[in-house]
Image: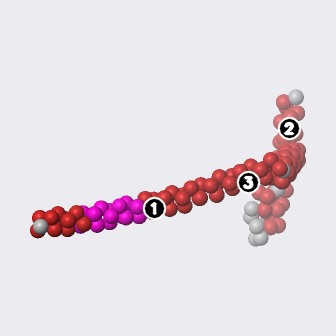
Amino acid sequence: KKLAMLSSKLSIAESYNDGVEEDNDVSSDRDPFSHLLRFPEEYAPVLHELEGVQDARRRLDQDRIDKNIVYLDSDTMKSALLSILKQVLILGLNQDLSVNIKERIESDMLIDKLLSTRLDIVQRQLVSQVEAG
């Protein structure tokens, strides 16, 4: 068995090499690497199998894309997107409100400081008037 298999592989290799030599004689001026672009017949089943696997993967990828499109069009996805959008809007509003609140707190502090300064001025004037008699 091994001998028969070895001899068949040898004959395939010889026929392959014969084709290469002929090509080299004919096309040595054109392309010395053209023999590398051909595959022996023993690789054909492997290539066909790989093509089948690749087609199956493409179909699987297309199915996944179709399912994702259906999911994106579904009401569940729409409600999830609306929920996320609401959260983003609420977050933005909270940030705006916090800025406004900080500004109001600062302005309240400045008003309190101004009022206390006025009160101090009035108290000093009263004290100076009382002392002056």
- Residue at the bottom extreme of this rendering: 29
Q: Earlier in the sequence, mark 2 or mark 3?
A: 2
Our reading of the magenta stretch's main secondary structure is: helix
Q: Residue at x 68, y 54 (%)?
A: 86
Cα–Cα span, label 1 and label 2:
95 Å
Q: Residue 25: percent from the left, percent from the top? A: 80, 64
Q: Nearer the viewer, residue 132 or 41?
A: 132
Residue 104 tag number: 1
Q: Residue type at mark 1?
A: Arg
- Residue 113 painted magenta: yes
Secondary structure under the numbered disc 3 in the rendered image: helix
Q: Residue 109: percent from the left, percent from the top? A: 37, 60
Q: Nearer the viewer, residue 117 or 22?
A: 117
Q: Nearer the viewer, residue 82 or 9?
A: 82
Secondary structure under the numbered disc 1 in the rendered image: helix
Q: Earlier in the sequence, mark 1 or mark 2?
A: 2
Q: Nearer the viewer, residue 69 or 104?
A: 104
- Residue 62 painted magenta: no
Residue beneath disc 2? 7
Query: Which residues, given as a range, are shown in magenta?
Result: 106-121
Residue beneath disc 3? 82
- Residue at the top extreme of this rendering: 1
- With respect to residue 8, does 109 lie above or below? below
